[in-house]
Amino acid sequence: MIDSHCHLDFDQFDGLRDQMLANAREAGVHTIINIGVDIPSSKKSLELAQTNDMVFATVGIHPHDANLVDDASLAELEQMSRLKKVVAIGEIGLDFYRDLSPRKTQIEAFRRQLELAIKSKLPVVIHTRESFRQTVDIVKDLARDLKGGVFHCFPGTVEEAYEVIEFGFHISVGGIITFKKAKMADVAAEVPLDKIMIETDAPYLAPVPHRGKMNQPAYVTYVCNRLAELKGITTGEVEKVTDRTCRKLFGLVEVFGG
């Protein structure tokens, strides 16, 4: 099983990372994609990947810190993007909910990092909150040249999910699908399984029965189980299909495995 999006480099995991990795392995998780959110986080993500066989890294600057995207930071990201075990540019996108960076700055930073992804020939991991239409419009402009990507913790409707799929992207779902009356669960039930990846977004959004506590990669099993319930299939089939999708998107070694 693959956790396609988590943040083991975050401070919440200080002193706990080895245990978190052990818990993940015990739960049947064999691969973790650790997501960078700024330059220091991207470096830590890369460090984790280089020292742990089961971890792969992405590098990018989150829209909250869009004001940090400049020629120097982009050059650092480009340099990191060439290194072994870096599998995507991300987490990038727009966040008009918290608006921690000016919207115009977010848009410019997003575009520049998408252009970096094209140059680096890497897929993208996209964050969008209260900004779906603007995000999609920007991605559509560049989709033909991008090497695919995923809208993580997908916030949209079924119709919006199909719009994303139409231009060659995937969606990922996390612990929210275990919550009562979750819109994400309705989307997960409807969208074809081979267009979905599963994630934790740890340390955030822990699934039921751990809701409200610190999330960890091992808990992706709860997401897998719930997705199987929504689809009316076995957890083994969900694991097989979502693993294959993740491997293919991120160019992992066993592209045709699982």
Image: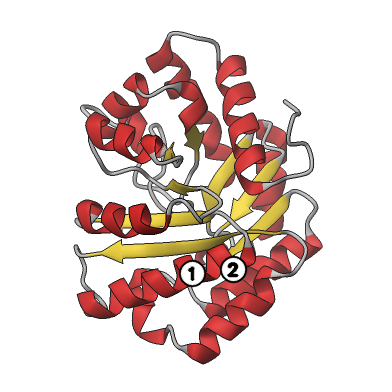
Inspect the image, locate mark 1, and give the three-letter code of the amino acid beneath it: Glu
Give x and y (percent) for residue 203: 47, 55
Circles 2 and 1: CB distance less than 8 Å?
A: yes
In the image, taking residue 76 as reference, residue 192 lies left or right, namely left
**Where 27 sits versus 83, above or below?**
above
Give x and y (percent) for residue 66: 36, 78
Identify the element where label 1 is drawn: helix
Q: Is residue 77 visible?
A: yes
Q: Is residue 59 visible?
A: no
**Where 59 sits versus 189, above or below?**
below
**Where 118 sits versus 29, above or below?**
below
Residue found 64% across the figure and 22% down from its top: 240
Pointer 2: what residue? 119
Identify the element where label 2 is drawn: helix
Q: Quadrant of residue 177?
A: top left
Residue found 23% across the figure and 58% down from its top: 134
Q: CA distance from mark 2 to mark 1?
A: 6 Å
Give residue 131's mark. Answer: none
Furthest-top residue in view?
232
Give residue 115's mark. Answer: 1
In the image, taking residue 56 as reference, residue 192 lies left or right, namely left
